Every structure is written in structure tokens, then in C-alpha cells.
Image (cartoon, coloured by chain):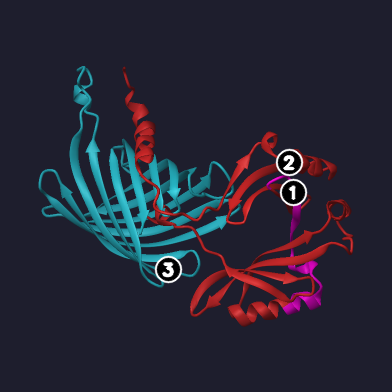
Chain colours: A cyan, B red
Amino acid sequence: MLPALNLSTKLSGLWKVNFKSESRILTLNTRELDRPEGLHAEYALTDFSLVISRKIGLGGSLAGGYLHRMRASGASASRFVQQYTLVTRSSGLRLAHRFSSDQTFEPNEPATIRLRYRLATEFSLQGQAVDAREWYLKISNELLSAWEGTAHDFEGRVVPTLGYAITDSNKLETAIDYRLEGLRSDRLRHTVWWAVTWYVSL
Amino acid sequence: MHLSFWALPILVPFILICCIPEAGAQKIEREKKVRKEVVPSTAIEFISSLRVTSKIKWYHEESLRGISWEAKTKVGIKKYSIEFDENGVLEDIEIQIHESSLSPEVSKKMMNVLSRHLGKPVTRKIQQQLTGKPEDLRAAFISKHTIPRTVTIRYEVVADGKVNGSKKRYEYTFDVYGNLLNHEQVLFRHTDNLEF
């Protein structure tokens, strides 16, 4: 499970700051599925990120930031993030192209560098645009290219999301985050996360 | 009661939504797709009289101006939007047109206004707005090329450009001669859930 809180606020004019806190909770333990009480929650980590972005044109945004990962074991990692997002609007649909890169550093681990492209589509389930008190669907598809030390691999993600706009600046989303890692190697790994995110614009 | 684990992604957000209070006073402006059965009969009758064969989508709109009903359809390559008040009385017909449909004089006058305000404007949409008696608007819709003189014609233009150094989008309303009547900035919805 990935419960997350995303807070953003305008700094001035074209600048905005975004704070996100996302935790990772493992809720299925395959070793214990044969036990009646086999379902349990195991806290894994929490990411705290701070990103500053600047509006470019009407639908573009250039951002850079820092993420700090705190694991349940006590270990931590640092990640630097850079991204460019372009949101276009057409006939009730919003399309977002996000190009990003991040560099992750962890003690005693090789540095990880990733290049990412994500395409997200959002559309209202009740009208031409997502208004307050309306449900919407968002589907995103992301491809990641990752280098860990000298090893390289690809990862694909598909995230169908159901969202509810309490207001335009207050949205709650629940999603199934499906990830397929090891696309290049023969060690394919499927993971499925249940993500719940609360977006608040102050 | 046994609860399937997979029901939780649906139930938990729903419970959270019920617990979260709406923040203060909110500007209510929303439109919602509706079934034809809930639309006032006077509006349905008017649309029927237009003899439209293509699909019609109905919307219920709430704004500070009040409640209205809107029928949207496409005839050929043209998009039509027909708006009615709360009781189903016809308010106007809007037709999306291309700049080439405007007379050169009117087009030039409009572009001069846009250029003065936006620098190098990029036109996104032009709509012709017709208001008048229902029978005149029906005639204008059916004939496609002839608009009765008793019908008031206006143009709504949506354009992008730079204002005070930053790119913005504005909606302009012009009369039939290309004189500016009104303009207002188009505000975009938050994109946090698409960026992060």
C-alpha cells in the first residue's frame, strides 16, 4: 500500500513549491497465506520530497527537488529529482507528459540513475471537465530506464486511478499501481501497489 | 461480516471523503452530463424541431448566473452548443467556426485587438453566438448559410498570448462588426495530480 499526502502552494507568480510524503506498507506476506491470520501490514519506508517548480508557458512546468527516504530498518537514501511536465487540454480530456530524471544515493549501495517518461490521461466521469464534487478517471503509463552502478534495466508501470475532486484544490485518489521490473533481464518481477493519495493545493 | 481485501481500495477513500469537510465558501460552477429524460420538455421540443440526426449530449450547468441546460451536437464538421435557461427556454446557439468564415474586415479588427492585448496572439477557438427568438434561431440553424436579420450575432474568441511577461489565455466577446465587448482571463484547473 502507498498512502501519500501531496501539498502544494504558490510561492509567487510562476513559482510553486510541492511537498509530498509517501509511505510504503507491505500488506501481503506470501509466506503466511496459508494461515488464517496471514494478512498483515509491515511498514517498509517513507519518502519525503520537496520540489520547486516554475511555470513555463501555459501548460508546461520545470521542476527540481530533493527526496529523503527513511527505511524501517533505519537506513536512509537521498534522491535528486528533475522533471519537465507538459499538460494539454482537449475536449474534456487532460493529457500530461512528464519527462524526469532522478539520482539516488544510499550508503554502501551503488548510485542509481533513472530516466523516466510518463503519459497520464485524466477525464471526468460526469461532464466535460472535472468540477468540484465529481468523480474522474486517470490512467498513467510510465517507462523507466535505470542504471544501478553499471547494471541497466527497464521498468514499466501502469496506474489506473479513480479520483474524487472535493474541490479543484482538494482531490483524493485511489489507484492500482502495477509495476513490471526487469524488462531487459530475464528476472521479471511483478509488483502491485494500492495507492491512496490526497492532493491539497494551499 | 467477511470483507474482501480488494474491497478496501473502494471503501477507504469513500469513508475518507465523507469525513473531510469542504473548505469554506466555494464558487459553484459545474456542469454534469445528464440523460435526456431529466431535461425540460420545452428544450427537448426545440431540439427535435431542428431535425438533427447526429448524437446529442445533454448537460446540466450550475454557475453564479444560475442553472442552465446545454445540448451539444456535431453536424458535419461544425460543433453546435444550444443553451436553455432553467425552465427550458432557449437562450442562444453557439457554433464553432474557423477564422476563414469571418469577413476580412471583421477578422482584421479582431486581430488588431488581440495583438494589442496579447502581443503575438494564438487563436484557439472562435464561436459564433446567435441570440433571438426561437423561430429565428431555428431558421438560422436549419438553413446553415442564412441568418435572419432579427438574430443578434456575436463572436467569442479564445486566444493565448503574453500579458505582463507571462503567457495567459483570454476569452474575448466581439459584436458582429468586430468591436470588443468584453474580455476575461481563462483560469486553468490545478495540475498537481498530473505533475506529482
| Residue A177 shows in this picture | no
What type is the residue that disc 2 sits on? Lys
Evaluate if marks 2 and 1 touch, with contact meaning CB atoms under 8 Å apart: yes
Residue A105 locus on image (x, y percent): 18, 57
The image quadrant where one finds the N terminus of chain A is top left
Which sits in the foreground, A3 or A98? A3
Please indicate, yes or no, whether residue B166 appears anywhere in the rendered image.
yes
Identity, as a three-letter code, of the amino acid under mark 3? Lys
Region of the chain picked out in magenta, as a range: B86-109
Can you identify the residue that label 3 sits on? A55
The quadrant of the rendering that contains the C terminus of chain A is bottom left
Q: Is residue A73 left or right of B95 when viewed as pictured?
A: left
**In magenta stretch: residue B98:** yes
Toward which corner of the image does residue A172 lie, by quadrant?
Answer: top left
Which one is earlier in the sequence, the residue at label 2 or at label 1? 2
A94 on left or right of A34: right
Same chain under badges 2 and 3? The reply is no
Provide residue B113's location: percent of width, then percent of height.
67, 79
Which residue occupies 46% across, 45% down?
Answer: A138
Give the CA distance from mark 2 to mark 3: 39 Å
For label 3, count other residues whose C-alpha is less than 10 Å away and answer few (under 14), some (14-19) or many (20+): some
Q: Read off the residue under disc 1.
A: B74
The residue wearing badge 2 is B55
Q: Secondary structure at mark 3?
A: strand
Name which residue type carries label 1. Answer: Lys
